[in-house]
Amino acid sequence: MNMTSRSRAEIAADQRPGTFRAEWFTIAACTAMVLLLLLAVVGKAEAATRGSGDLALVVERANGSLQVVETTGNTSLTRIEGLGDLSHASAVFSRDQRYAYVFGRDGGLTKVDVLEGRIVARVVQSGNSIGGAISQDGSLVAVSNYEPGGVKVFSADDLALVADIPATYGDGKRSKVIGLVDVPGQRFAFSLWDAGEIWLADFSAGSEPAITRFEDIGRNPYDALITPNGRYYIAGLFGEDGLALLDLWHPENGVQRILPGYGRGEQKLPVYKMPHLEGWAVAGNRAFVPAVGRHEVLVIDMNTWQEAGRITVAGQPVFVMGRPDGREVWVNFAFPNNDTVQVIDSESLNVVKQLQPGKGVLHMEFEPRGEEVWVSVRDLDELHVYDTATYERRSLLPAQKPSGIFMTSRAARIGL
């Protein structure tokens, strides 16, 4: 009679109650261990899952890095390094808010995955750039360049070059380009510092843009903005007093000069830092803009585009930014008053609060519904978060020479 390789004694031993229980416990222990490992992996994945709606990027200009923060608990999540010269950096966001496109002063264009905290792609596309914009459908990213002067447009997907628009004028010279914004209709608007012109680049028909030029708009447009509804493009003029306005609903009417001579006949002050028009403070039918070289904020009646008032402030304003509900306007200043933030009541036009965060206040950014505002304080290496109802500081986060603050909610706003 053939026997298996195992003896009857061994089989009998396996069948004893104690042995069966020991094997059962061993199997149960292994199964439990596997389940615990699976639960740990699932739990970790769930912990790492987050939406992008309350995230923001903080530019750390000295180190070429970005800090990713979240605005629900006001905490820092991670740091992304290797973005080059960020001394005058800005960022725009993809439609889903996951990706940021960061424009560096060294000509670098970097695509960043905000959720994963990493660089996806990077190109150095010029010698000196000054910001950019993303198209209405989110497929194109445009960069404005000082050197060589012009605009380059890239695929938002892989940063492949789509179009190169040299800003030529006169006898073939090239102008620095500033004030680049996205415009409804798959268009970009930008201004030419040296030429004194505004251009519209229309990509609605494909990758070959149709260019419309508006000449003699004024001397040295230094920055520009677009109204929140996308209708009016307004360029500030550094070479003369006044602003240049283009009605994008009726571009055939050309450029209109508004607020001409608002400082004429008065002594000019030295300009310590160029003001920015990006914030576009709008409250009701009034707009608030910084006066170049003056300790004033100008108030414009948007029905008539006439001056509606002037507000004396603590220094030369840099950013004049409206709270999302339009009830207040927050202002920061150039050196030597760059330790100060003032709050203007948009109804009474009075300064109602003054804060002293510290030297080197470079930028402010409101959370989407305006309950808090983030302030970068470069010289203290800090980010301050203030309650806009009480003006109390709620949070303080360390940062490495912070400057620009960019919330992902910008993805849904025209011109930002």
Image (cartoon, rainbow, N blue to C red):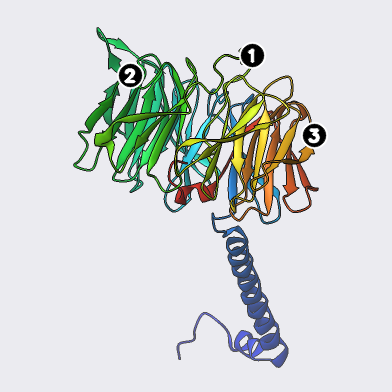
The residue identified by callout 3 is: 356
| Residue placed most toward the observer, 95 or 366 | 366
Looking at the rendered structure, the kind of residue marked 2 is Asp
Across and down, in percent, residue 279 comes to: 55, 38
Residue 216: mark in rendering = 2
Looking at the rendered structure, the kind of residue marked 3 is Gln
| Residue extending furthest toward the top | 171
Q: Earlier in the sequence, mark 3 or mark 1?
A: 1
Q: Residue at x 52, y 37 (%)?
A: 300
Q: Quadrant of residue 293?
A: top right
The residue identified by callout 1 is: 269
Q: Earlier in the sequence, mark 2 or mark 3?
A: 2
Marks 1,2: beta carbons within 8 A? no
Q: Quadrant of the N terminus?
A: bottom left
**Residue 399 drawn above or below residue 27:** above
Looking at the rendered structure, the kind of residue marked 1 is Leu
Q: Earlier in the sequence, mark 1 or mark 2?
A: 2
Q: Alpha carbon of mark 3 to alpha carbon of mark 1: how far?
A: 24 Å
**Residue 33 drawn above or below residue 335:** below
Q: Residue at x 49, y 86 (%)?
A: 3
* Helix, strand or loop under label 1: loop
Residue 159 vs residue 112: left or right?
left
Q: Is residue 333 visible?
A: yes
**Residue 207 drawn above or below residue 12:** above
Q: Is residue 59 visible?
A: no
Q: Residue at x 45, y 51 (%)?
A: 412
Residue 392: mark in rendering = none
Of labels 3 and 1, the one closer to you: 1
